[in-house]
Image: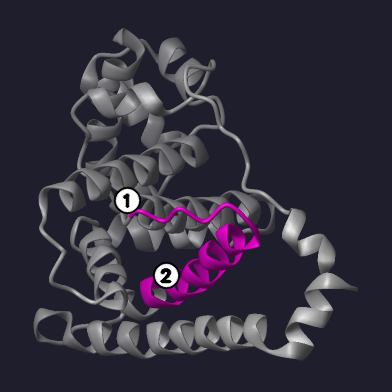
Amino acid sequence: MEAAITREKLLDAALSHVAFDGWSEATLKAAAADSGVDPGLAQALFPRGGVDLALAWHQAGDREMVRRLGEEDLSALRFRDRVARAVMLRLELADREAVRRGTTLFALPQHAADGAGAIWSSADAIWTALGDTSDDVNWYTKRATLSAVYGATVLFWLGDDSPDLQATRDFLDRRIEGVMWFEKTKAALAKNPLGKALMSGPLGFLARIRPPHRPAGLPGHESGASETKAPRPF
């Protein structure tokens, strides 16, 4: 718990420096100085410096999104609209300059996998918060398609200056329409005689795919982090 509180202090202190120094070692050092955290402890909590800072900030944003979604009544919305609401809520919680700096950081080849993992985690958080119960290959396809939608929408949002982000909302609706078409096509194929033949033959291995099992309580697991107040996310 103490480590989580210290991480929170560092993350809060870091944001004012990100606009000038990006998600970098310099930002971590400045955050340690501003928050009164020992520099050695700060380095131990974020061993890769700015990369780990940026990822921790992104995770904090995902947790806050999930918390706020849990407080909203989405029952009257179509499922596609619930997904759109979750994505827009995630953006509403974001600091645009912090995201822009993060996008620059994760565009570097050595950090591209971390960036892709962060986007996948956001997609996973959204599907889980909306009650997805997939227990087969659909668990992966849903998150893969939403990751593509979310990543494209973030890039569009970074340049959007329309009132109430209407241009971003319209862009997101078009992307989700594409996802809905894909899901309908996939469902139709599953009912089609040819699709059934493929699933019982060459594509039969897909029926054996299961989502990863992630038990809580393991060292490094994020489950306890949500018990602390999340810093302002990006």
Crowding at mark 1 (Cα within 10 Å: few <14, some 14-19, many 20+): some
Q: Earlier in the sequence, mark 2 or mark 1?
A: 1
Secondary structure mainly formed by the magenta segment: helix
Question: Looking at the rendering, in which quadrant would you find the N terminus?
Answer: top left
The spot of residue 53 in percent (x, y) is: 42, 36
Q: Helix, strand, or loop for circle 1?
A: helix
Residue placed most toward the observer, 115 or 35 = 115
The type of residue carrying mark 2 is: Tyr
Residue placed most toward the observer, 223 or 9 = 223
The spot of residue 119 in percent (x, y) is: 48, 58
Q: Is residue 126 above or below residue 79?
A: above
The spot of residue 90 in percent (x, y) is: 27, 59
Q: Is residue 47 magenta?
A: no
Q: Is residue 147 magenta?
A: yes
In the displayed structure, does residue 92 sit left or right of residue 86?
Answer: left
In the displayed structure, does residue 127 sit left or right of residue 119?
Answer: left
Q: Is residue 195 above or below residue 137?
A: below
Q: Which residue is mark 1?
A: 129
Total numbered labels placed on residues in the image = 2
- Between marks 2 and 1, how big is the CA–CA gap? 15 Å
Crowding at mark 2 (Cα within 10 Å: few <14, some 14-19, many 20+): many
Say which residue appears at 24% left-offset and 14% top-offset.
Answer: 36
Q: Which residue is mark 2?
A: 150
Q: Residues at badges 2 and 1 in contact (C-beta under 8 Å)?
A: no
The type of residue carrying mark 1 is: Ala
Residue placed most toward the observer, 186 or 219 = 186
The spot of residue 158 in percent (x, y) is: 32, 74
Q: Is residue 7 above or below residue 82?
A: above
The range drawn in magenta is 131-154
Q: Helix, strand, or loop for circle 2?
A: helix
Say which residue appears at 74% left-offset and 84% top-offset.
Answer: 195
